């Protein structure tokens, strides 16, 4: 123990703790162990709970030792940081990693009713009610402390954080960092479905806008990425997500149409060619040839490795680059009054528009979307079915 003034005997401390061996800087009150740390805003010292009554003396020493190093082993923040260093995390896609980092920051920074952060709580002390309460608060927009202002309701973010924690705790159990999974059994909150599917006139206005702006010299005022018009056409006609557009290759070009490369368990299909689709594919193929030749890039021999959409430097276009290009274009269109702010839509909304505009019965719509679940198909097909009224059959003759 660090030399200093000898502690006075405290009869209220847990009986299994040798008070003479307690580390310096840790204190007991209200059935919890706490330390003092500067407040992040005004710098004044504040209490922070680090353990509870059943903590062992060795754990208290480890807390103080690791506190001086800026981390406390066994806390939620520690486990989340360890997960980010593991091979399971590194094998995930860049987009999933980004989303998980956001979920980790949300969980670690969540403020509890006593003013402490969830990230500072030991995982061994977490239970289902604590995680459920966090999910409910994030979803409703309330705060754990009445003194703080209410936040915007985020049910989708609440569910994402809960599912992320459930995965991390399962990983922690396998590697001995967690004894149980306190997120297992937590109920997801209901998310308000907001599809933001563009109206036909909004879609046509946005398509005309990017067609004109794509002809301007790159990186000049008012210009947009040249591939955006073709991307819009393919996302709508082939009913693709953004990631599915960027990963199209020459292997998806068939004589009778474009074969999809769907994600999330959806079924592939082949969408028959129309004039817009032929224009989009031919334009993108020509643009790819020009950009790769300009930068001296070799052409892949296998069709499945030749990405259709490339960046200005001739490299395969990434999903994040497409998202950035789309956001710049949509904000420019709103600023210039091409579309109203309330008509703003995501690139994914074009798949909704394409599925909704599919002619035929429910089976035709389902085949076009690639979804196997009827519930999911109904989320994408916004067209209200038109049905005929019932017709009462003629009364049967009694034979009299």
Image: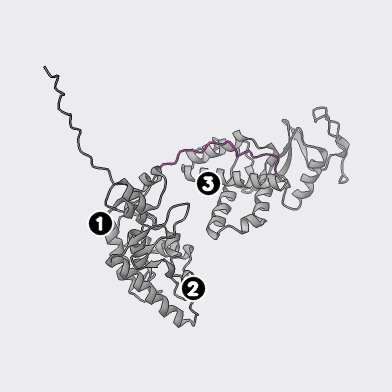
Marks 1/2: CA distance?
A: 40 Å
Q: Residue at x 84, y 31 (%)?
A: 16
Residue count near mark 3 (Cα–Cα under 10 Å), binned few <14, some 14–19, many ≥20: some
Residue count near mark 1 (Cα–Cα under 10 Å), binned few <14, some 14–19, many ≥20: few
Image quadrant in which you'd find residue 223: bottom left
* Residue 376 visible in the snapshot: yes
Res. 201 mark: 1
Residue that carries the numbered disc 2 in the rendered image: 302
Q: Which residue is more in the foreground, 361 or 342?
A: 361
Q: Are marks 1 and 2 in contact (CB under 8 Å)?
A: no
- Residue 20 drawn in magenta: no
Res. 167 mark: none
Q: Report the magenta residues as a range.
A: 178-192
Marks 3/2: CA distance?
A: 38 Å
Image quadrant occupied by the C terminus: top left
Q: Is residue 229 left or right of residue 42?
A: left
Q: Residue furthest front?
A: 399
Picture coordinates of residue 278, whole percent (x, y) = 31, 69
Picture coordinates of residue 106, whole percent (x, y) = 57, 47
> If you read the primary sequence from the N terminus, does the residue marked by circle 3 or circle 2 appear first?
3
Residue that carries the numbered disc 3 in the rendered image: 160
User: Magenta span: helix, strand or loop, mainly?
Assistant: loop
Q: Residue at x 41, y 80 (%)?
A: 290
Q: Is residue 81 left or right of residue 348?
A: right
Marks 1/3: CA distance?
A: 34 Å
| Looking at the image, residue 173 lies above or below residue 97 | above
Q: Residue furthest top?
A: 400
Helix, strand or loop at label 3? It is helix
Q: Is residue 261 left or right of residue 275?
A: right
Helix, strand or loop at label 2? It is loop
């Amino acid at each position: 123990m660090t030399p200093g003034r000898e502690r006075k005997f405290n009869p209220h401390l847990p009986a299994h703790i040798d008070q003479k061996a307690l580390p310096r800087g840790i204190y007991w009150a209200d059935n919890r162990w706490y330390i003092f740390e500067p407040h992040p805003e005004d710098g004044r010292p504040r209490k922070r709970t680090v353990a509870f009554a059943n903590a062992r003396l060795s754990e208290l020493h480890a807390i103080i030792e690791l506190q001086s190093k800026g981390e406390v082993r066994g806390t939620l923040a520690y486990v989340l940081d360890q997960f980010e260093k593991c091979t399971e995390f590194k094998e995930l896609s860049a987009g999933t990693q980004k989303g998980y980092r956001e979920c980790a920051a949300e969980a670690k920074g969540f403020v509890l009713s006593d003013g402490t952060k969830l990230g500072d709580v030991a995982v061994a002390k977490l239970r289902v009610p604590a995680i459920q309460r966090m999910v409910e608060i994030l979803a409703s927009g309330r705060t754990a402390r009445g003194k703080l202002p209410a936040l915007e309701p985020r049910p989708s973010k609440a569910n994402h954080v809960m599912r992320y924690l459930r995965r991390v705790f399962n990983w922690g159990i396998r590697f001995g960092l967690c004894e149980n999974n306190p997120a297992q059994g937590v109920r997801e909150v209901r998310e308000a479905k907001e599809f933001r599917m563009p109206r036909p006139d909004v879609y046509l206005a946005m398509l005309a806008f990017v067609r004109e702006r794509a002809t301007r010299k790159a990186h000049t005022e008012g210009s947009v990425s040249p591939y955006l018009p073709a991307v819009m056409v393919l996302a709508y006609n082939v009913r693709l997500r953004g990631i599915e557009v960027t990963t199209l290759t020459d292997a998806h070009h068939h004589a009778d149409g474009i074969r999809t490369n769907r994600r999330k368990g959806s079924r592939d299909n082949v969408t028959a060619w129309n004039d817009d689709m032929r224009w989009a594919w031919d334009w993108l193929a020509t643009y790819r040839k020009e950009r790769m030749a300009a930068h001296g890039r070799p052409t892949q021999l296998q069709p499945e490795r030749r990405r259709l959409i490339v960046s200005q430097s001739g490299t395969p276009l990434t999903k994040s680059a497409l998202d950035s290009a789309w956001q710049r274009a949509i904000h420019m269109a709103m600023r210039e009054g091409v579309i109203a702010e309330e008509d703003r839509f995501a690139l994914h909304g074009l798949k909704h528009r394409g599925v909704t505009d599919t002619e035929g019965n429910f089976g035709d719509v389902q085949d076009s979307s690639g979804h196997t679940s009827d519930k999911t198909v109904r989320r994408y097909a916004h067209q209200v079915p038109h049905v005929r009224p019932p017709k009462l059959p003629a009364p049967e003759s009694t034979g009299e």
